[in-house]
Image: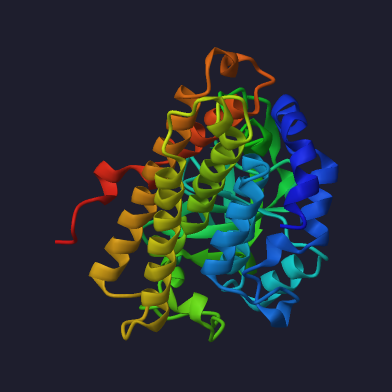
């Protein structure tokens, strides 16, 4: 909360610049908010996904783009903590861990070569935080051994070895700077490679994993839970703006703000309850039903919070269409965030088979 207050001053500038200003990143760095999940042995907070969710919510109440970057980049330290020791030493040597994420790096499969993997002619899109990252965790298709069929692997790429593409022209979350990039050619050494299956606690951990509750959870279940904090925060921001405006209670309000606030509270409580269930589950990573419930409730929480923001926008009068109207930016950011596949209830709402 202490960081969120001064962060609010940079929200409009981040929207204009299409990336988070350096001063805003410094606020997050100084508070070590990218290292909420980083194990204490590596200099981090050693907290869990509930703290990641709530810190993201607080930041997003002031600036959704900053909250989004905290969620994405802060979640990647959890991944790196399961990489080989040499990679952990490289990444966590910095005072603050800035790691962008690129799922499904496009292009031909990586080639297995002596000492590592050769990436050639690859490209990525929606790489949130790449402007401020020192490293990028990217998923590639690669053979686990010479002659084997390619399988999903995670690789650590130095951000400086990528070629930027200035294509982040979007309706919302502009301040995340989630632009595209290419990797013309890069040799990734073996110690910067991790099989994707290693992120499921049911599978063996080839390089070990911390023995704390967050590492008993599966990436497929909790990997995007902090993103829900962005929708929680924007919903609260919209309600803050509404109740403090001429359209609010003093100006003939038509919204039931108490009910809308309860909707946001309920969405958060649901996610925290799911995280607690996974933390104490007798099955590493959670049962199939527990994992499915977590994914469903992430989608449900995001959907309900998007509806809260949209209700506020629709009740805010014609002046809300101006670019300098705070509710307009909140509305754009919330709807951009809710387009992420993790919030698609049609995809995640079904019960496990």
Query: Relative to residue 252, is residue 157 drawn left or right?
Result: right
Of residues 24 and 323, the one drawn nearer to the viewer in this rendering: 323
At x 64% / y 30%, what residue is drawn? 174
Q: Where is 340 relative to 328, above or below?
A: below
Image: 259 above or below 30:
above
Q: Is residue 348 left or right of residue 155?
A: left
Residue 80, image x and y in percent? 61, 67
Residue 342 point in image, percent of width and height: 39, 47
Q: Residue drawn at (77%, 55%), measured in percent from left and top?
A: 3
Residue sitting farthest toward the left: 353
Quadrant in the rendering for residue 21: top right
Residue 308 or 200: which is nearer the viewer?
Answer: 308
In this view, the residue in front, 100 or 11, is 11
Colour scheme in use: rainbow
x then y, percent, for residue 14: 73, 33
> Is any atom of residue 76 visible in this view?
yes
Q: Percent position (x, y) of residue 223? A: 47, 60
Q: How many tags in the picture?
A: 0
In the picture, which quadrant includes the N terminus?
Answer: bottom right
Residue 238 falls in image quadrant:
top right
Image quarter of the C terminus:
bottom left
Which sits in the foreground, 250 or 24?
Answer: 250
Viewer can see residue 122? no
| Image position of 229 (left or right of 141) | right
In the depicted structure, whether residue 250 falls above or below residue 343: above
Residue at 71% over, 61% down: 33
């Amino acid at each position: 909360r202490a960081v969120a207050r001064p962060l609010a001053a940079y929200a409009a500038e981040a929207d204009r610049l299409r990336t988070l200003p350096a001063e805003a990143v410094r606020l997050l760095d100084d508070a070590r908010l990218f290292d909420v999940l980083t194990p204490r042995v590596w200099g981090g907070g050693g907290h869990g996904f509930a703290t990641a969710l709530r810190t993201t919510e607080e930041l997003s109440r002031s600036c959704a783009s900053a909250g989004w970057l905290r969620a994405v980049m802060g979640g990647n330290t959890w991944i790196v903590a399961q990489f080989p020791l040499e990679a952990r030493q490289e990444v966590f040597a910095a005072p603050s861990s800035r790691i962008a994420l690129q799922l499904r790096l496009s292009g031909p499969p990586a080639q297995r070569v002596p000492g590592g993997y050769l990436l050639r002619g690859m490209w990525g899109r929606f790489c949130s935080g790449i402007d401020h990252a020192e490293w990028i965790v990217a998923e590639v298709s690669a053979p686990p051994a010479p002659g084997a069929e390619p399988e999903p692997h995670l690789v650590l790429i130095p951000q400086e070895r990528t070629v930027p593409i200035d294509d982040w022209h979007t309706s919302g979350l502009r301040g995340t700077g989630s632009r595209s990039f290419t990797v013309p050619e890069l040799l990734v050494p073996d110690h910067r490679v991790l099989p994707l299956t290693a992120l499921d606690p049911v599978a063996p951990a080839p390089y070990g994993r911390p023995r704390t509750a967050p590492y008993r959870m599966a990436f497929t279940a909790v990997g995007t839970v902090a993103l829900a904090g962005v929708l929680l925060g924007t919903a609260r921001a919209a309600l803050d703006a509404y109740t403090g405006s001429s359209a609010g209670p003093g100006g003939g309000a038509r919204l039931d703000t108490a009910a809308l606030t309860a909707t946001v509270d309920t969405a958060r409580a649901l996610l925290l309850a799911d995280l607690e269930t996974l933390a104490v589950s007798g099955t590493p990573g959670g049962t199939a039903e527990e994992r499915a419930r977590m994914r469903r409730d992430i989608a449900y929480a995001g959907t309900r919070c998007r509806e809260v923001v949209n209700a506020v926008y629709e009740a805010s009068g014609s002046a809300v269409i101006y670019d300098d109207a705070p509710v307009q930016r909140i509305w754009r950011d919330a709807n951009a965030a809710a387009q992420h596949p993790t919030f698609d209830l049609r995809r995640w709402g079904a019960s496990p088979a």
